[in-house]
Amino acid sequence: MFIRVHLWLTRRVLRCISTLGCPDFSLDETLALAARHGLAAVEIRALGGTVELPRYFAGQFGAPEALAAQMRGATVRVAALDTSLKLAGAAPGDREAFLAYVPWAEALGARWLRVFDGGKAGDAAELIAMAETVRWWRDVRRANGWAADIFIETHDSLFTADAINRFRSHAPGTAILWDSHHTWKKGGEDPVATWRAIRDGVVHVHVKDSISVPSAKHPFTYVLPGDGEFPIAPLLAALRADGFGGLVSLEWERLWHPYLPSLDEALTVARARAWW
């Protein structure tokens, strides 16, 4: 019994990073950084100073087949390509721009394509519109036999457990990328309580730390892991207790918040403090 409990307490989550923290890096530099810090995976939002990833990959590799060849033997996997599509109000042009990511996700072996929720909290019509975009995607994906699927980041309107679950009632089976800091800071929810309410749909978790001091863009300021107020320890304990098998990703938003130190420094500090 003691051995089983000890293993549960010491088992680490599978760790990941978003390239928001190193947006000027190449793919090789990103994978090398992740490998150096012993991470399982990366999610790609920016590379080479741009978030226009299909254009970046085309310029660097020419075709998805060349990118797939480049990834053979990589020790760090690409978990996701993070797109800019918002489910609410997705126009035909937005959908076409999103579809340009799919061949590259397939080449990378990425399981997920990140999309945003969009919309405004409490707008029932927008929940229906979001679900319609999910149905559109499922039809296109099925017709093409693609392996990659979407997960929806809790970002604009889905910042409480109730809102997330109301959306999922309109689009059952949708995978959730839970931004745990967002539901904590904007939604005012205890992350452990949110987790217990939405855990059956969550496949990926974003974490970060902050203090309650206004910054240029937010009523809070992001800080190095462990310097802030985010209750990471009880959240990780809850994830371990439930055997969460997805990735827990440090979303170090240096692209949007250049006051932040380097991602390498953030990872070094997080490891030294056993923060995550």
Image: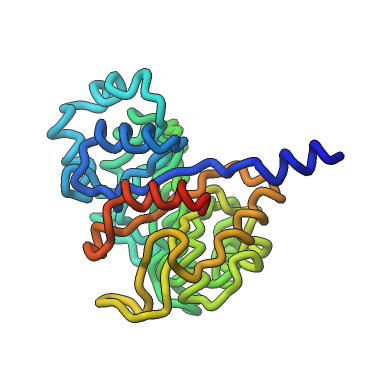
Q: Can residue 139 be seen in this view?
A: no
Q: Image point 41% across, 32% down: which residue? A: 77
Image height of 42 relative to 175, above or below: above
Residue 76 x %, y % = 40, 30
Image height of 89 relative to 236, above or below: below
Image quadrant where one finds the N terminus: top right
Residue 276 x %, y % = 52, 51
Residue 275 x %, y % = 51, 54
Image height of 51 relative to 76, above or below: below
Q: Is residue 109 visible?
A: yes
Q: Is 230 left, or right, of 118 in this rendering?
A: right
Q: Is 80 left, or right, of 29 in this rendering?
A: right
Q: Image point 20% across, 26% down: which residue? A: 63
Q: Image point 83% across, 40% down: which residue? A: 2
157 or 14: nearer the eye? 14
Residue 111 x %, y % = 45, 37
Q: Image point 59% across, 42% down: which residue? A: 12
* Colour mapping used in the image: rainbow
Residue with the most extreme front position: 272
Q: How many labels does the image show?
A: 0
Image height of 208 relative to 80, above or below: below
84 or 230: nearer the eye? 230
Q: In which quarter of the image is residue 26?
A: top left
Residue with the most extreme left position: 59
